[in-house]
Amino acid sequence: MQRLIFAAIVCLLLICPMQVFAVGLPPGTQIELQATGQYTDIFADNQTATPATLTLTVLQVAGTSIDWDVAQDTPTQSEYFYIPVKVYNTGNGTDIFTLTTSSENGWTTDLVYDDNNDGLHDDSETTVITD
C-alpha cells in the first residue's frame, strides 16, 4: 500500500501541469511544492494520498558577458586609443569580477570608467578602474 501511494505521488510530481520558473530569482529564494493524489485501491475504496511537499532553494549562479566594439583604426605610436567595453552580470546574484588588460605589443593599458555611459571616451573621464 505504501508503494502504491509513493508511486501515485511520484506520478503526480512528474505529470503535474504546474510549472515553476526560477529565472531571475535571487539566490536563497525558497520554492515550496506540494503534491496530493486521489486514487481507488484494490478494494474499490477511494483514497487520498498523504500530501508530499518539497522545498527547492535557488542557488547562486555566476555568469558574465562582455561586449566590445572592435576598432577599425590602427593606433599609432604615442597615441591614446580607446575601445569601449561593457561587462554584464548575467548571473542571479551580486558578484565581483576581476578585469585585467594587456597588450601583445607591450603598450600600457588601463580600464577607464565611462562616467556618462555613452560608450565614448570624453576628456573629463579619467577614472582608472583599479578595484
Image (cartoon, rainbow, N blue to C red):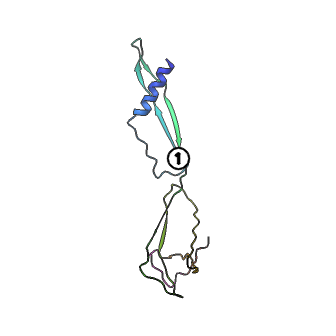
- What residue is at 39 percent from the left and 33 percent from the top? 15
Q: Give the residue at the far front of this rendering.
A: 105
Magenta part, dominant SS: loop
Q: What amino acid does circle 1 point to? A: Val
- What residue is at 53 percent from the left and 75 percent from the top? 113
| Residue at mark 1 | 58
Residue 91's place in the image compared with 130, above or below, is above
Residue 88: x, y in percent? Answer: 49, 64
Residue 8: x, y in percent? Answer: 44, 25
- The answer to which of 119 and 29 lies nearer the viewer is 119
Residue 65: x, y in percent? Answer: 48, 62
Q: Give the residue at the far right of this rendering.
A: 131
- The answer to which of 79 and 124 lies nearer the viewer is 79
How many numbered badges does the structure rendering display?
A: 1
- What residue is at 57 percent from the left and 63 percent from the top? 97
Residue 88's place in the image compared with 104, above or below, is above
- What residue is at 46 percent from the left and 20 percent from the top? 4
Residue 79: x, y in percent? Answer: 51, 87
Residue 45's place in the image compared with 7, above or below, is above
Q: Residue 118 magenta-drawn?
A: yes
Q: Which residues are magenta?
A: 117-125
Residue 129's place in the image compared with 66, above or below, is below
